Amino acid sequence: MKEEKDVSLFEKIKFIFLYGRDFVSTLMYLNYNIFAGVMRIANSTYLDFISELSGRRAYYRASKRTPAYKDFLNASKEKSISETDKENYIKTYSIEQRCKRGKISAKNVMIDESSGSTGTPYNWVRSKAERRKSHGAIRYFARYCFGDTFDITINAFSMGAWATGMNMGKALEHSSIVKNTGPDIEKIFNTLDFFGPTYKYLILGYPPFIKQIIDIAKERNFPLHLYHLQTLVGGEGMSEGLRDYLSTRFRDVYSGYGVTDVEIGLAGETPLSVAIRRLARDNNDFRQHVFGSDSRLPMLFQYNPLEHHVEVNDDGELLFTINRGSVISPRIRYNAHDQGGIANYEKMKQYLTDVRIDIKMLTPKNTFQLKFPFMWVYGRKDFTISIMGANIYPEDIEQCVYADPFLREITRSFCQSTMETKESAIRPVFYFEINVTPTEELKLKFQTTITENLRRINLDYKAAWNEHKDVLLPEIHLYPIGEGPFKMENGQIKQRRMLKPGT
């Protein structure tokens, strides 16, 4: 999106042509077949152009109609459009000021609450019209990835004020029978037992919780293998090792991406994006060619450019603009501080051509390819620990765990932190929640395996290890289910990945 504050007369004239885009967008969400038909003939370059122009129009409208954003722009001394985030925008202005015309409508508005995984939970308002579009995006995403092969959807996302829970149930009740169990293991097994293997199931939830379903089924000898299961996960990243593990019982495993600050259903994995990500996992040269020198394997999604305009700032963080006019609290160049990158369809096609792979060969024959742009996400900066110049990410630890068949079987959750030694050096600390009795022998197994795998997948850690083995060797703490720092997760909707130093 152009970053100049001033919108030219020529741009305003071009905005008129976006009414056609608005009509097509509305038409698409009336029926999946219309959506599929439009997407089959959509041109990648045209989608990019419309996305940028729609983002520019969203900026112009917000600058005129939203008191907080108007004041934000006036206070900025820059000629370009400054980014917004929680610190400079959400905390600075009241929720009413951040709404169009400075007020919250008394009808057809729902309030969501963010999880507070990085601190204080926040409230977000959504209009009925924008929720309808968001639900449609989720429903079509599920239909595209899973087809019409599920009869019953079990929604295991946390219920209540959280953005994901009730919205996921509402979105998919148009496609299947829905039971909103929340993350209640007993209710899920009771549901599976009651309806039996005759039905086909789509289970929604956070990746570690879906893993628990498999683990507990093994403990109880529940015949999960007799069931036709698929899963749609979200809320946090997922390693390919975890996908492999989930795939032992779930026929299809896809992840969605959303930011409560912006909206759920921002992007989703597709058969194509998963195939590309797995190719990057197995081919380090290709991974670096696409994603750069970062040792992590990011989540890779596709997003609808008609609904969202996505940019990347100089710090490698994703910026989101909601293109729709139905949004009552506009988000313009909003930075949730997720690190990542973007590439349009043609650029990704070229990346694959460079390694002699035809992009058309990476999806099943009966699945058309979405010409949507790609977005990759590493995660939040504030979930990272840094020791001797080596950044260690939660994604690294998850990869290390799932690279070892024994550790992935017994590990329920994990988090990381740092500690100060008697010599005033900083050392990494990893905490693991396991479903067996902790022992010193097992602690050594974790330490050895994690260290070996970190040196293999994290080049910065490997380089630092060669010079500072004494402080790079992690301290390991093992806890039974629900004990130690994992007691903190009771009542929370996401697992914590970071603890304060010295915890």
Image: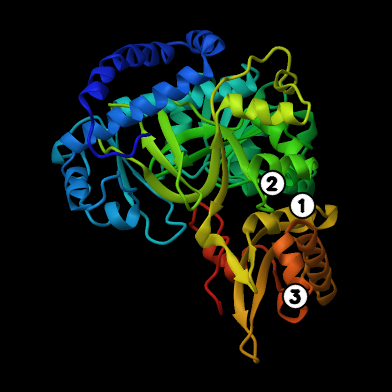
**CA distance separating discs 2 and 3:** 23 Å
- Identify which amino acid the numbered label 2 is placed on: Ser
Quarter-wise, where is residue 233 in the image?
A: top right
Q: Is residue 440 visible?
A: yes
Check disc 1 and report its element: helix, strand or loop.
helix
Q: Earlier in the sequence, mark 2 or mark 1?
A: 2
Q: Is residue 127 visible?
A: no
- Identify which amino acid the numbered label 1 is placed on: Tyr
In the visual, does 284 lie left or right of 118? Answer: right
Q: Position of residue 353 (x, y in %)?
A: 72, 26
Residue at 42% across, 43% down: 319
Q: Which residue is mark 1?
A: 402
Q: Which residue is mark 2?
A: 239
Q: Position of residue 37 (x, y in %)?
A: 53, 8
Residue at 75% across, 68% down: 463
**Answer yes or no: do the residues labelled 2 and 1 have beta carbons within 8 Å?**
yes
Name the disc covering residue 473, or none.
3
Which sits in the foreground, 218 or 63?
Answer: 63
